[in-house]
Image: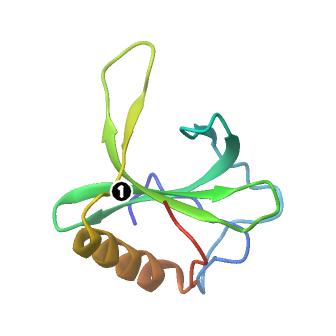
Amino acid sequence: MTDKDKCAPGCCSDGCDCGPDEEFEIMTLEFDDGKEVECEVMGIFDVDGKEYIALYATDGSDEVYLYGYKELDDEENDCELIDIEDDAEYERVCAVFEEITGCEEEEAE
């Protein structure tokens, strides 16, 4: 992961220097059915030359959402989250995420 990365509860690797006072960036995901989920940004990482973001749900469900990530130079939006629609791409992203964090995710978008 890059210097943009954060650690998430239960997913810190050996040598992680985050502590109980670590603050996480929060993003709110809104799904097609209108449901909203607040998530902590776990980190932004690279797979095959593309950036992806991992988001950890703060609602107690322990869900992790993975999206393509693109920074924007837009005053209203800092970034764009891109659905990963290709199954093979999604599997590669999951494998890299699990390797980086040492966590097995239960469900991802």
Q: Quadrant of residue 70?
A: top left
Q: Residue at horizontal 42%, vertical 85%?
A: 99
| Residue at (36% x, 78% y) in the render | 96
Q: Is residue 57 above or below residue 72?
A: below
Q: In this view, does 24 lie above or below 87?
A: above
What is the residue that sits farthest to the left in this orientation?
49
For the N terminus, the image quarter is: bottom left
Where residue 15 appears, as percent x and y from the top left, is 60, 82
Frontmost residue, 94 versus 32: 32
Residue identified by numbered label 1? 52
The residue type indicated by label 1 comes to Tyr
* Rendering coords of residue 17 (x, y %): 65, 70
Image label count? 1
Picture coordinates of residue 65, whole percent (x, y): 53, 59
81 vs 87, left or right, is: right
Residue 79 place in picture, x, y as percent? 39, 33
